[in-house]
Image (cartoon, rainbow, N blue to C red):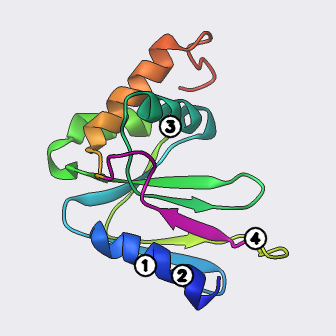
Amino acid sequence: MTSTAAAEPAATANRFDWSISHADDTLVVTFGVERAGIELPAPLRIGVELFFQDNGLSGPTIAIGGPVGRHIRLVTGISKADRAIEYLQHCGAVLHVGRAELPLPPVSGLDPAWSAGGGHGHRHRIPPLVAVAAAVRAVRLYTPDGLQQLP
């Protein structure tokens, strides 16, 4: 990623109290107080993104390219969300707190290995972790197959 391309993610990160840096093959994210990153399994992530769009929610995310692709959503309110954290981890989510080192895939062509954004729509706020847990629950309850492949 060029320094010009990195400027926008850095501005987004500073605005939301997280810092992002990267070396050759590692993205380092440091989360501020009461902040964390939540990484959901792909079937849940897609449903949660649709749920958030349908309900006018938004927030900062990091997308990491590669064959599988990873998305980490910045959340807040982690100190009062023990049950939500348990539930999300039971559903296969990974919670990143403090300082996270995320491996980057090899860069091919002009596509960057990662990007960060502030979300879409009118609201650019950090959602509480419990909102993500509620979205996961809704996705699991109201999808045709109930996402049975998940634990």
Under mark 4, the amino acid is Asp
Residue 150 x/y as whole percent = 57, 26
Q: In percent of the image, x 77 and y 74: which residue is there?
A: 106
Report the residue that reaches farthest toward the right: 109
Residue 41 x/y as whole percent = 57, 40
Q: Which residue is mark 4?
A: 111
Q: Secondary structure at mark 1?
A: helix
Label 4: how many Cα within 10 Å (few below 14, some 14–19, many 20+): few
Under mark 1, the amino acid is Ala
Instruction: Inspect this view and state whether residue 19 appears.
Output: no
Q: Which residues are magenta?
A: 111-124
> What's the distance in space between the residues labelled 4 and 1, CA to CA?
18 Å
Mark carried by residue 49? 3
Q: Is residue 109 left or right of residue 151?
A: right
Q: Are marks 4 and 3 in contact (CB under 8 Å)?
A: no
**Is 117 part of what is drawn in magenta?**
yes
Under mark 3, the amino acid is Glu
Q: Is residue 47 left or right of residue 84?
A: right
Which residue is nearer to you in this view: 30 or 123?
123
Q: Which residue is mark 2?
A: 6
Q: In percent of the image, x 28 and y 52: which residue is there?
A: 125
> What's the distance in space between the residues labelled 4 and 3, CA to CA?
23 Å
